[in-house]
């Protein structure tokens, strides 16, 4: 659970709805731009495409984060945890850690 909070912190940086820092301008702009868009239909169409693109990018980032956490890291960590319990000395621990890192890189 401790690792998950560190991982989601980075995902939240991309999401202004969750206090993200990467796109802070979008928070205020989403309220003012629709009013401006009503004055100009061309601008409204462009803004709509921008909102759709942002939603698609947000969806992609959240799904990628979820995949990395649950399909890659969780499985590799479970195996590493078992090897950690069996490790009898520091050399075995180092080899287990190297296998853990290799599995993460292969899954990514």
Image: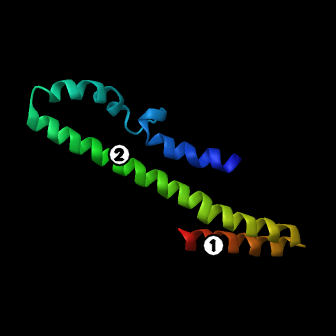
Secondary structure beneath label 1: helix
Is residue 23 rendered to the left or right of residue 80? left
In the image: residue 99, left or right of residue 90:
left
Q: How is the image coloured?
A: rainbow
Residue 38 x %, y %: 14, 27
For numbered disc 2, what is the local secondary structure?
helix
Q: Residue furthest right?
A: 88
> Compared with residue 59, is residue 77 higher up or lower down, i.e. above or below?
below
Report if the CB atoms under discs 2 and 1 are less than 8 Å apart.
no
Q: Mark 1 points at which residue?
A: 103
Residue at 69% x, 73% y: name it: 98
> Which of 76/44 is in front?
44
Q: Is residue 91 above or below residue 32?
A: below
Q: Residue 30 location, x and y as percent? A: 30, 30
- Percent x, y for residue 56? 35, 50
106 and 46: which is toward the camera: 46
**Percent position of residue 52, x then y:** 28, 45
Residue located 16% across and 30% down the image: 37
Q: Who's the residue at 48% across and 55% down the image?
A: 63
Mark 1 Cα-neighbour bin, 10 Å: few <14, some 14–19, many ≥20: some
Q: Which mark is residue 55?
A: 2
Separation of marks 2 and 1 at Cα, in angstroms: 31 Å
Q: In which quarter of the image is residue 25?
A: top left
**Is disc 2 surrounded by few (<14), some (14 to 19) or many (20+) residues within 10 Å?**
few
First in sequence, mark 2 or 1: give its number.
2
Query: Which numbered circle lies on residue 37?
Result: none
Front residue of 17/13: it is: 17
2 or 1: mark nearer the eye: 2
The correct choice, above or below, for 41 with respect to 74 in the image is: above
Tell me: 93 left or right of 38.
Answer: right
Please state if 34 lies on the left or on the right of 17 as rendered.
left
């Amino acid at each position: 659970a401790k690792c998950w909070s560190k991982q989601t912190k980075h995902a939240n940086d991309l999401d202004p709805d969750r206090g993200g820092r990467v796109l802070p301008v979008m928070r205020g702009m989403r309220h003012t731009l629709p009013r401006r868009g009503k004055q100009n239909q061309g601008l409204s169409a462009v803004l709509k495409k921008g909102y759709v693109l942002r939603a698609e990018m947000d969806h992609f980032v959240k799904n990628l984060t979820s995949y990395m956490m649950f399909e890659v890291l969780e499985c590799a960590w479970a195996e590493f945890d078992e090897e950690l319990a069996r490790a009898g000395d520091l050399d075995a621990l180092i080899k287990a850690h190297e296998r853990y890192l290799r599995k993460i890189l292969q899954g990514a």
